[in-house]
Amino acid sequence: MPSPTVIPVFSRHRHPRLRYVLKELSRDLGYDLRLMTDPDRWKKAGSGAKVSISVDFEDETYLRLPAHPILHGGAPETNDLRVSTKDGVPAFFLVDGIPDYLACCFYALSRYEEYQPFAADAHNRFPAAESHARTNGYLHRPVVREWAAVLDHKLRTVFPELPPTKVHPWRFRPSYDIDILWAWQHRGVRGAAAGFRDLLTGHPARAWKRFTSSPERDPYQSLAILHALHLPPGPDEAALNPIWFWLLADNTDRRDPNPYPLPAAQQALIRELSSTNDVGIHPSYRASDSPEILRTEVERLAKLTGRAVRHSRQHFLRFRLPATYRDLRSAGITHDYTMGYADEAGWRAGTNLPFFWYDLEKEEATGLTVHPFVAMDVTLKNYLGLGPEAAVTYTTNLASAVRPFGGDFMLLWHNSSFAEEYGWQGWQQAYADLVMALRNTGNV
């Protein structure tokens, strides 16, 4: 593979924020946007494409970009966040009327707003309603990809000889949170209590099924259906590559319905899945507030699978920055998949591409890779109030917005979200339709 084209970027400031955003944009566009603070070195770097951030040079050909103070440690003012559509995309951080797209990218990827005071929801989460993207109507757009494309266009206007931009193949990737594997089977005291609750609340038929059905007829036992959906539909298609997150919590909180130790049948299933699929930990509700509980749950999964645990997604999508991500790193996690909202669909960090987490308090890029997802089943049905068919249309529209840029398109689903006995009538077929629409070709 040839080395990426080096594009020297001159700035008077060598701040970690600027270095970080240049590296992330390099990963998207396929260039090597190389920061330089020595003007003589920058001038001697060759006759190819060059960028200067807010500095003018005579007798040089270069793309000049504005410089907002946020990229060298400053804090934005309220006026800085007013949205403009100067280049046909929503942007802010205007400098002399020109958006600083590098600053916009940093603001989105670093999750800068989540370090500021906000009104948390009932689960102490940062809700979409508090976000700049939701407030200003661009949450459904992969704006970081759009800003990168605008910068690339500006570069090519000055330097048309630049090689083609990096191509990111479209990839639909299913992801599943297994909060509870069975609705009725292997539930012990909790299952019996739920059965009596069904009787008392007017669901005698469901209570009868709970006590008499075989494991393979359990309404949450959908893994065989999902495996069939992941298979290639034709000889020229590839199988999908799902990832499964397992809740291994203590029996101390009703919001963690899969108490440890697990039934032997579930332990065997986790071991079998981990031999052919990516699996990760689904840290419990209480683990979000306790590094010790998190480490215990990670160790449980490692013991079950016989391998180190590197992937994680928070139960209830509960995380706070920077504490949760620091805890994950301390527990050996290198990939997190929690970057999305419960109350809205869309791109929480403005991108569908994986990116490295920037610890804003420590002002350093980290080795934790963040994998965004765009929508969760419960969000579509319960928060947005969509029926199965409307959810398919809604989600494929989200895909259409990101398809031109390529890269990952991840959904969050639960094995329990096909159970007609619990209000999910029609969702099994809807999900099958989504998988067919979103898989390898990305034709939506």
Image: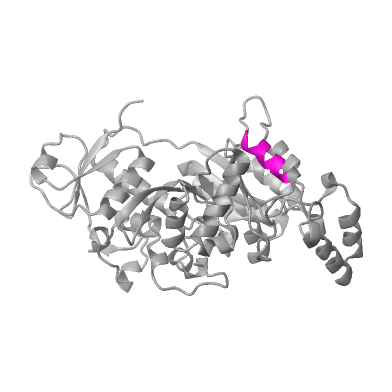
- Residue 109 lies in quadrant: bottom left
Q: How is the image coloured?
A: one colour
Query: In front here: 63 or 339?
Result: 339
For the point 48% across and 43% down, the residue is 404
Q: Is residue 37 visible?
A: yes
- Residue 423 lies in quadrant: bottom right
Image spot of residue 279 (x, y percent)? 59, 42
For the point 86% across and 56% down, the residue is 210
Position of 46 with respect to 313 (left or right) is: left
> Number of labelled discs?
0
Image spot of residue 319 (x, y percent)? 50, 61
Position of 222 with respect to 323 (left or right) is: right
Q: Main secondary structure of the magenta part?
A: helix
Say which quadrant the C terminus sits in.
top right
Would you place residue 174 above or below residue 341 in this image? above
Image spot of residue 292 (x, y percent)? 51, 58
Would you place residue 291 above or below residue 430 in this image? below
- Residue 219 is a magenta residue: no
For the point 34% across and 49% down, the residue is 150
Q: Is residue 349 visible?
A: no
Query: In front here: 422 or 161?
Result: 422
Would you place residue 115 above or below residue 442 in this image? below
Image spot of residue 367 (x, y percent)? 39, 46
Say which quadrant the N terminus sits in.
top left
Stretch in magenta = 266-275
For the point 35% across and 67% down, the residue is 81
- Residue 269 is a magenta residue: yes
